[in-house]
Image (spheres, helix red, strand yellow):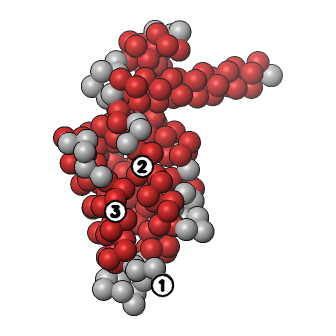
Amino acid sequence: MARRGSYAKGVARREEILESALDVIGRKGYQNASLKEIAEVVGVTPAALLHYFGTKEELFTAVLRKRDERDELDHGAIGAKDARAGLIEVIRHNTEVPGLVQLFSRLAVDAADPEHPAHEYFLERSAQMREVVAKNLGDDSGPLDADTTARVVQAVTDGLQLQWMIDPTVDMAGIVEKLIDALHPRH
């Protein structure tokens, strides 16, 4: 019986760590969010953080998963009635959390290495995003087939995040809206 209570407390602590890390990274940015600061917010030591997540990279990968769960990106935000509006809303929301955009972009580069802890996350997330975009925004009657449309939208959204981090005046949502209109005009 004690194990269940102990397990539940561990799950709750893990969630608390993820929520705190999301907050710290969102406010301070990826580069300025240290394990020490995240641990202090939660009231544990940096070693305790690593007890729950193993490595800093595993913690940050879990933070991205939590962000996706919280934002419902992979659970229908862009599969809603108006998939176009859902995708644009996710992109607009990203401009409010620059630290998480930094984290996503930096880990995406690192995750190109198949040995990196975030590699599987990015493979899964990319496949899910393309599937949702192809299903909801792809149209084989348009200039591109649904799968190609999904790849192009994903490439543009990922690339625009990098451009936006360098120049925050880049209107990511506006550009993606125009792209979708060009690829999948509304009738």
Q: Is residue 146 visible?
A: no
- At x 49%, y 40%, the residue is 67
Labels 1, 3: front one = 1
Q: Tag 3 or tag 2, which sits nearer the N-term?
A: 2
Compared with 120, 52 (above or below) is above
Which amino acid type is marked by label 2? Arg
Q: Tag 3 or tag 1, which sits nearer the N-term?
A: 3
Compared with 118, 180 (above or below) is below
Which amino acid type is marked by label 1? His
**Looking at the picture, how far across and down is residue 137, in whole percent?**
45, 74
Q: In the shown orientation, is residue 187 left or right of residue 16? A: left
Residue at the spot of label 1: 187
**Looking at the picture, how far across and down is residue 54, in whole percent?**
42, 26
Which amino acid type is marked by label 3? Val
Dividing the picture into quadrants, the one containing residue 109 is top left
Q: How many marks?
A: 3
